[in-house]
Image (cartoon, rainbow, N blue to C red):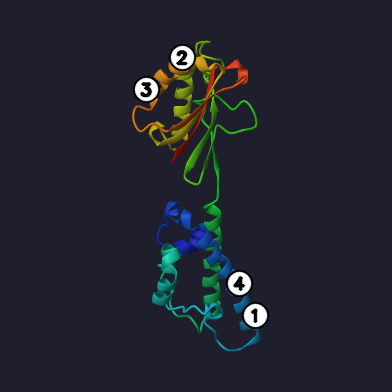
Amino acid sequence: MAWCAARSMHVPTIDVGALRKRAPIAAGVGFASVAGTTLWHASCSSSKRSMAPFACLGISTDSRELRSYLSPCFFPLASVSLRRISSHERKGEATFGIWNIALVLLFIGLNVKETVKTEKAPAALGPYSQAVKANNFLFVSGVLGLIPETGKFISDSVEDQTEQVLKNMGEILKAGGASYSTVVKTTIMLADLKDFKKVNEIYAKYFPSLAPARSTYQVAALPLDAKIEIECIAAV
């Protein structure tokens, strides 16, 4: 409903990515707006005088003044064309309500996380997601060298498993709107650190330039007795 109301007011498309860094400001404006609405209702119910919708917050309803006040922290929403409606309390109330809803929904949207799932990569082996997208990043769970269709390892060779791990990871990245080139951090877990050189040779083919940051560990054991597991973080 808020979306439809925003469309009817000709609110321009909001670049959510650009506003993520300003979420605290957006929340503050939203809470101030809610508080202002409450005070305004109280004032209007105790007085017969016609009052401007933003009077309780001390903010003018003139579109130019309002845009000037809000543009440093909330320019996309502030560009809504508003008219002085001091003599129309009902219309002012509806306008204020739309702003409240839009601000709250935007703040919620800035903090939403989204799970990623694809049949082109091995299914999760437990209560976790293949990847989770949040705050402009894609967090990919540890990937094994399993064939997606069978759920079995491609072979017992660390080279073959490494190749399959990276192919599976590529499918998850693609499903999440990322790619090898947007990966910023990887973590490699090896059953035997002596395989480090073999893994590096294959790994380098997938990250030929601007290689992401990386950590490599030898672990006591990996799921299904795998030879290698890799997880990563990518920008989206």
Q: Is residue 1 left or right of residue 171?
A: right
Badge 4 amino acid: Ala
Task: Categorize mark 3 by other alpha carbons within 10 Å: few (<14), some (14-19), many (20+).
Answer: few
Residue 153 in sight in this render: yes
Q: Secondary structure at mark 1?
A: helix
- CB contact under 8 Å: marks 2 and 4: no
Q: Which mark is residue 35?
A: 4
Residue 102 in sight in this render: no
User: Residue at left 44%, top 74%?
Assistant: 66
Badge 3 amino acid: Lys
**Mark 3 lies on residue:** 205
- CB contact under 8 Å: marks 3 and 4: no
- Quarter holding the C terminus is top left
Mark 3 or 1 closer to N-term?
Answer: 1
Mark 1 or 4 closer to N-term?
Answer: 4
- Quarter holding the N terminus is bottom right
**Mark 1 lies on residue:** 42
Mark 3 or 2 closer to N-term?
Answer: 2
**Mark 2 lies on residue:** 159
State the CA–CA distance, disc 1 to disc 4. 11 Å
User: Residue at left 62%, top 77%?
Assistant: 39
Front of the two marks 3 and 1: 3
Mark 2 or 4 closer to N-term?
Answer: 4
Mark 3 or 4 closer to N-term?
Answer: 4
Front of the two marks 1 and 4: 4
Badge 1 amino acid: Ala
Residue 160 point in image, percent of width and height: 47, 14
Front of the two marks 3 and 4: 3
User: Residue at left 49%, top 38%?
Assistant: 138
